[in-house]
Image (spheres, rainbow, N blue to C red):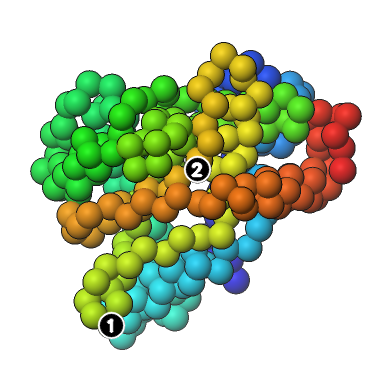
Amino acid sequence: MILIKRESASHWYLRDGTPFHETERADGKGLRSVTLRDARKVRAFPSVTNILSILAKPGLDAWRIEQGILAALTLPRPEEESLDAFAKRVVTDMSEQVAQAADLGSAIHAACEVYATSKALPESPEVAALFAPVREWFDRDVERIDCIERVVTHPEWGYGGRVDMVAKLKSTGSWAVVDFKTQKMKRDAKGALKPTFYETWPLQLEAYRQAILVEAARKQPQDIVSLVISSIEPVPVVPKVWPREEQTAYYHAFINARNLWVWMKGYCPIESTAA
């Protein structure tokens, strides 16, 4: 039994970096998400997250399962409600929790962009409270900003993506690709909030860094950094500078995932690098 039809966002970019996420419906009534079939017609590049979506993500899957279990335990069930109907309500409630987390993450990302460009603070009290530690990190560690929320593409391997920020950090003394990650951090045995760093994060960041490196006119970042921001209470952000000595391995892993994606989809936007 399929409870709810699932639709995954599939982002694409044209070769010049123009986002190609939506296209006009056949009946002319609005827009719809771009499909692989649409991408083939214009030889669009898949996004980095599109490529990495083929990999299993046990941590994320466990979180989604947890949301489903919590919904099943907390939702009231009338005696006359069938099990199938209750199951659908559980999945709907779980999906709403996931969507709310995504919306909050988007709001915090937007706050980062606005603050980086204008020093303006969020109007929403909830977002402003959660953003306060991020502002402190910006003021303490960000020396200069090269770009924020900028699309990059890699012409050789045929992928693209939107980079959260490239900045020179005081803590590392170097230019870095920075990715903002909001997370409902859990507490350890001593009560301290601890983030979870997922194995695909450095692959995503290194893919962005390599795309930036082929653009000679841009700053040449040496480091890749994940900045974890709490989505439940205003606690200090947790930055992680991924080891430079592992960057080659991260990129090889990403290219392997890219080649697997090409094989699974039967589509290579750059024929000379077909797997």
Disc 2: which residue: 224
Q: Residue furthest left?
A: 125
At x 32% / y 81%, what residue is drawn?
73
- Say which quarter of the image contains residue 26: top right
Instruction: Relative to 81, say whether 236 is above or below.
Output: above
Instruction: Relative to 97, say whether 208 is above or below.
Output: above
Q: Mark number for residue 35? A: none
State which quarter of the image contains the C terminus.
top right
At x 53% / y 36%, what residue is drawn?
222
At x 27% / y 56%, what residue is drawn?
230
Instruction: Relative to 236, say whether 213 is above or below.
Output: above
10 Å crowding of disc 2: few (<14), some (14-19), many (20+) = many
Residue 115 percent coordinates (x, y): 24, 29
Which secondary structure, mark 2? Answer: strand
Closer-to-camera residue (164/72): 164
Mark 2 or mark 1: name the one nearer the start of the chain. Answer: 1
Q: Nearer the viewer, mark 2 or mark 1?
A: 2
CA separation, marks 2 and 1? 30 Å
Residue 95 percent coordinates (x, y): 41, 59
At x 75% / y 33%, what residue is drawn?
157
Disc 1: which residue: 189
